[in-house]
Amino acid sequence: SGTFINEAVVAGLVSAGANVLDYGVIPTPMLQWIIRHNPDIKGGISITAGHNSFKWNSLIFLNNEGAYLNKLEGDEFFNLHHSGYFDKRAFDNLGKYEKSSHMMQDYFKTFQLENNDPGKLKFIIDCSNGFDASFIQRLARALGIEAIPIFSSEDRVLQKNPEPNTANARFLETIVKATNSDGGFLLNSDASRVLMVDETGKAL
């Protein structure tokens, strides 16, 4: 449902005169970082229900600091919604829409370590099929570690419960042990929650 929800969100924002940057499928924390480090961006929407089962989808609203709305901001948002008073722009005054990757490279640069030793540490990363493995590989290169992503194909139906808890970490525990890795990370499908597995294969 993500595609048509995305199109509905874009249509609503553009019809109200807002300019929209569409970053495609990225982890929610990355979107939060982009908002926080770009003063021209006034807020964001992440289309995800990251730790819920596959039948769910939702909108997560982010303020101009890239944070989730607090109670006051949430109340104000719903008051505006229930009032029914919105900007409705004419055809010649609509907002602009563009696909963007602006600042994504800067995001990875913030993790760049001096004198890192590529391959020194090895981790298994369970992505819960929320986003493509290329994101994990770019992050691993910046950190100078070896990362082995599993369940990392965004076009597949979730094959397991994406809630990062110890019960759902058993497969990851097995892989960490079998590969003699330095640990593992179990992410929910939008990487907004994480559970760690230590080098002995025990979920923390």
Image (tube, grey):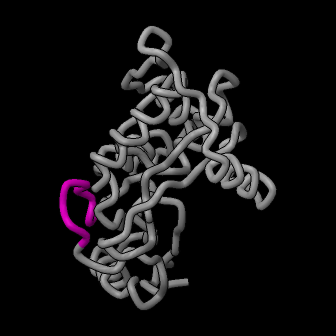
Q: Residue at the bottom extreme?
A: 167
Residue 114 in view, yes or no: no
Residue at 22 percent across and 56 percent down: it is: 153
Where is residue 4? Give x, y as percent: 28, 46
Where is residue 164? Give x, y as percent: 46, 77
Q: How many marks?
A: 0
- Looking at the image, residue 121 sits to the left or right of residue 127; the answer is right
Instruction: Give the camera-side residue of 75 and 126.
Output: 75
From the viewer's perspective, is residue 188 above or below residue 22? below
Where is residue 98? Give x, y as percent: 39, 21
Residue at 44 percent across and 8 percent down: it is: 92
Residue at 62 percent across and 49 percent down: it is: 81
153 in the magenta segment: yes
Residue 160 in view, yes or no: yes
Over which residues does the magenta segment extend? 150-158
Q: Residue at the front extreme?
A: 84
In the picture, residue 147 is in which quadrant?
A: bottom left
Tell me which secondary structure the magenta stretch mostly adopts: loop
